[in-house]
Amino acid sequence: MFKNQLLAVPMMFLFLIAAVPAFAGGPIDETLFTTYQIDSSYVYLSVCGSLPGSYGCYGSGTLGPFGSVGALLEGNASVNVKEGVVTRYIYALDVAAGASGTDVDLLVYKMTDTISPPYATVSVTLFKTISLPLAGGSSALASMAANTKFIFIGTNQSPQSVRLQKSNFAIIQSGSFEPPINVSAITSDKYGYVTVTFGAFSSGDTGFIVYGPDGSAVEDGGGAPVMLSTDQAVLPAALPY
């Protein structure tokens, strides 16, 4: 039943209320939030919350179709206060792309919220599709984490991850281990450090590489450590053992 509910973009609704003062110095979109409904082929998003003079849902969008959605990540917002425009990128990883269903593509969507209380409009468009030098497939498990400048992406079908530079979408492959062991997790901390972990955690064939905020490798070795962030838990049951 849940899957059937995803086949249509949620209906938008908006309630107008008595006029209230405009923004009191905070981010112009701080009272709005975006939810994402995911199935294997599409992702549906809704922007809801409240604005001075109204509350409800203001707009929606659809991402896809995908062969299989492997990971989703939302970028930091760029805000034009004068124009009332908030722009951010959404990074959607397709791990079963291409005719073979084994390619890995990163689809970059541009979402623009135009805010003019009590109203707002939402626009979502495909900005760029990037083919990644990674192996995928319908059963591939993806890992993805980011800092301010870079996105780190891997699958459990490839012995290397990739580092994508946000500013120009340049791709650099990570180092790997010998004998080859596939990527098992990519995690980050609040300071912009990212750890790419390789191999099943309970096996003796493991390794890791830590990248700094500037994208350079700062540590590597054996073992299977992960990093913790302040807003998203690492789930041990989801890690390969």
Image: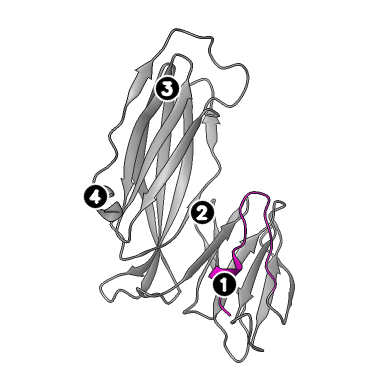
Residue 146 relative to residue 103: left or right: right
Circle 4 packing at 10 Å, graded few (<14), some (14-19), many (20+), is few
For badge 1, the amino acid type reads: Leu
| Residue that mark 2 sits on | 168
Nearest to N terminus: mark 4 or mark 3: 4
- The answer for how far apart the CA atoms under marks 1 and 3 are is 39 Å
Residue at the extreme top of the image, as rendered: 19
Residue 211 relative to residue 4: left or right: right
Residue 131: % across, % down? 40, 66
- Front tag of 3 and 2: 3
> Which quadrant would residue 66 be assigned to in this image?
bottom left
- Quarter of the image that includes the C terminus: bottom right
Question: Is 140 drawn above or below residue 117 in the view shown?
Answer: below
- Tell me the number on the disc at residue 55: 3
- Numbered disc 2: secondary structure: loop
For badge 2, the amino acid type reads: Asn
In the rendered image, residue 144 lying in the magenta stretch gets the answer: no
- Numbered disc 3: secondary structure: strand
| Residue that mark 4 sits on | 7
